[in-house]
Every structure is written in C-alpha cells, then in structure tokens.
Image: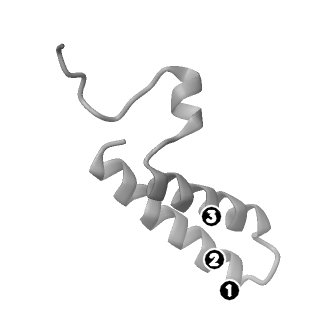
Amino acid sequence: MALWDAIARVLIGALLITLAVELKGVFTVGLVVGVILILTAMIGFCPLYKLIGYGSQPKTET
C-alpha cells in the first residue's frame, strides 16, 4: 500500500468515526467502515485490493 493510500484511509476513517460518535448511532455503518479503513492502513494490506487485483504501489521490475 502506498503512503498516500494509507494517509487517505486514516483521514477518511477518522472522519467517519467522528461522524458516528457525534451522531450517536445514526451513522453506525460509518463507524464500522472507519475502523476497517484505519486497520487496513495500519497493517498495510487491503483484502479488497487483493480480490480485485489492484495495488496502489508502482510495479517494480525484477
């Protein structure tokens, strides 16, 4: 996962979690998605990217 991808995930995840806390239950899905985004940014792996064959890092020649 590229650095810009991880930063975007953390920012969007924090925003979703903040909205979920402020709206007290109305935005429960946002809480779940926000936590998933932050966790995938922390571990550097996104299962959805693997499933669809996408990667945010440039390909290296070997």
Q: Which element carries disc 2, helix, strand or loop?
A: helix
Q: Which residue is mark 1?
A: 22
Please tell me whether mark 3 sits on a helix, a strand or a loop. Answer: helix
The residue lying toward the viewer, choosing from 34 and 41, is: 41
Check disc 3 and report the residue beneath it: 35
Please state which amino acid type lies under the numbered disc 3.
Val
Q: Residue at x 36, y 48 (%)?
A: 5
Q: Residue furthest left?
A: 61
Is mark 2 in CB contact (under 8 Å) with mark 1?
yes
Total label count? 3
Marks 2/3: CA–CA distance: 12 Å
The residue pinned by badge 2 equals 19
Q: Is residue 42 above or below residue 2?
A: below
Identify the residue at image location x=62%, y=64%.
35
User: Alpha-carbon neighbours of circle 2 within 10 Å: few (<14), some, or many (≥20)?
Assistant: some
Alpha carbons under labels 3 and 1: distance apart: 15 Å
Dots 2 and 3: beta carbons under 8 Å?
A: no
For residue 7, above or below residue 22: above
Mark 3 burial class by Cα count in 10 Å: few <14, some 14-19, many 20+: some
